[in-house]
Amino acid sequence: MSDRRLQVFSAVAHLLSFTRAAEVLHMTQPAVTFQIRQLEEYFNTRLFDRTHNRITLTEVGEKVYGYSSRIIDLYGEMDNEVRKLTGEVVGPLIIGASTTIAEYVIPNLLGEFQANFDTIKLRLFVSNSLKIIHMVENNDVDVGIVESPVENKNLVTKFCRQDELVLICAPDHPLASRAMITAQDLVEYPFIGREEGSGTRDVFLQYLQEHDMDFSSLNMTMEFGSPVSIKSAVAAGLGISVISIATLDRELERHALVKISLTPPITRPFSIIYQRQKFRIRVIEEFLDFTEEQCRKMVVENPPVA
């Protein structure tokens, strides 16, 4: 019985979806269905109940799922120990990154890592911070890099670098000449925000609450799912926004936007997260070591905001 069947079965059992398992495994849905059918023929019984467009594990399926998880972990440990002896670093590495980090921070990091380890196959999932945290919790990705606080004690959280959120406006906006603004100054103008689940949104909401405000205090006119869309809307004069300073280099160079610091400032960490109890193959260890070294360099080059 090939371990590939168990890997496919384990993915379907974890996600309870043939379609999502096919996406995660980069397979077609018929190919996933075929692997499951072969496994069911091997055991001569059904592993899933299929009713009303949803699937559930049968009693036998639950038993197979328990064993398959242990077998796959053992395969991973065996592979890892052998590669330690041979000095080889190969295999897939699945990384999840929140939107701001994926667009403005991680491309150079992944490029340099891939240049050092060209035998590693990198896959990157991009979403907001909340979704990436859930993907790490569910083992959908090996390592996450996020921009919001992480409260799950089953996850290891390692500081990478400090980020600052600043207000942005168009060059001809009434606020453009200000050197500093307060939270209360924001209520007078149309505001463009990030979507729910965004790390930027969560940190900004916490900041507002510390000043006895919330989003209802603002004249919220639009919400977008990426910094790019927000910057375009602000540059077009549709409102003001609060965004990571890490996203603004090009716009500031072209004088398309003006940035204004808030007082007191809004700061937040960019953090690396992974499962505390998960067995870590050498590929993950190498990536963690590499990113921690790169993060130390970032702190030296860009010291935390005072």
Image: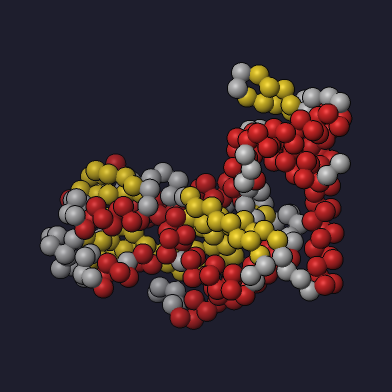
- The spot of residue 294 in percent (x, y) is 55, 75
Q: In this view, does 284 lie to the left or right of 183?
A: right
Q: In this view, does 47 lie to the left or right of 131?
A: right
283 or 137, which lies in front?
283
- The spot of residue 122 in percent (x, y) is 60, 60
- The spot of residue 298 in percent (x, y) is 49, 76
Q: Which residue is drawn at 50% across and 52% down?
A: 126
Is there any visible trace of residue 229 in the rendered image? yes
26 or 10, which lies in front?
26
Q: Residue at x 84, y 24 (%)?
A: 45
Q: Residue at x 15, y 68 (%)?
A: 177
Q: In which quarter of the image is residue 274?
A: bottom right
Q: Residue at x 78, y 41 (%)?
A: 5
Colour scheme: secondary structure
Is there any visible trace of residue 143 in the rendered image? no
Check the image and name the residue furthest to the top. 52
> Could you tell me which quadrant the C terminus lies in?
bottom left
- The spot of residue 288 in percent (x, y) is 64, 67
> Could you tell me which quadrant the N terminus lies in?
top right
Q: Is residue 188 left or right of residue 205?
A: left
93 or 220, which lies in front?
93
3 or 304, which lies in front?
3
Q: Is residue 272 left or right of residue 209?
A: right
Q: In which quarter of the image is residue 20?
A: top right
* Total numbered badges shown on the rendered structure: 0
